[in-house]
Image: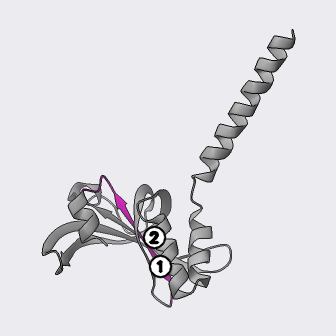
Amino acid sequence: MKKIIKIFLLSLVLICGVGSWSHAKTIDIEELIDTFQKATDLQKNQILQDNTGKEISASGIVANAGEYDFFDITNDIKGIYYQLETEQQKTKNGTPYQVRFLFKDKESVKDLDKGQNVTKDGKIIRILDERLQISLWLFCGDLTEKEQKLLK
């Protein structure tokens, strides 16, 4: 009987530990936006460095979708992607922000309509303070090494 209780308690500790570990890896989009908005330029650089490449789920109402060209003059790299912009939203603390999703293929955005609610998962590639709002850029898909350089 004591063995069963020990096994049960050990299992409970492991389950709670794994549960809190997975919770720690989840990024709260509103908390990230609010923290970024209040940060100094040095702190913003650190927040971006700490979160670039992390997977996050975001949602919003489609404002527009279109082609977006990137060109990195340092590495002479070019890429064409498809951007999905959402309408401006506000965090619970009132910080205005917009989510921009980037896709490799046109098929991912061609059937979306303005006003449609979307939820997508993507990797953080940029967080920009545009003074009137924070812009969160997410890349939906696998990033190659070339694309990581291009989208910096």
Q: Give the image location of residue 52, x and y in percent.
A: 43, 65
- Please identify the quadrant where the C terminus is shown: bottom left
Q: Compared with residue 63, is residue 104 higher up or lower down, i.e. above or below?
A: above
Tell me, yes or no, whether the two marked residues, 2 and 1, touch with CB atoms within 8 Å. Answer: yes
Q: Compared with residue 107, is residue 100 higher up or lower down, i.e. above or below?
A: below
- Asked which secondary structure carries label 1, the reply is helix
Q: Is residue 107 left or right of residue 33?
A: left
- Please identify the quadrant where the N terminus is shown: top right
Q: Is residue 54 left or right of residue 12?
A: left
Residue found 35% across the figure and 61% down from its top: 139
Q: Give the image location of residue 126, x and y in percent.
A: 40, 72
Residue found 68% across the figure and 77% down from its top: 93
Graded by Cα atoms within 10 Å as few (under 14), some (14 to 19) or many (20 or more), the crowding at tag 2 reads few
* Residue underneath mark 2: 49
Instruction: Give the quadrant of residue 67.
Output: bottom left
Q: Give the image location of residue 74, x and y in percent.
A: 18, 79
Residue found 49% across the figure and 66% down from its top: 50
Q: Residue furthest bottom?
A: 131
Of residue 129 and residue 73, the one placed in the foreground of this image is: 73
Residue 45 is tagged as 1
Q: Give the image location of residue 57, x and y in percent.
A: 49, 56
Q: Amino acid at mark 1?
A: Asn
Q: Compared with residue 63, is residue 6 higher up or lower down, i.e. above or below?
A: above
Which scheme is used to colour this image of the protein?
one colour
Instruction: Give the quadrant of residue 29.
Output: bottom right
Q: Is 140 included in the stretch rendered in magenta?
A: yes
Q: Residue furthest right?
A: 2
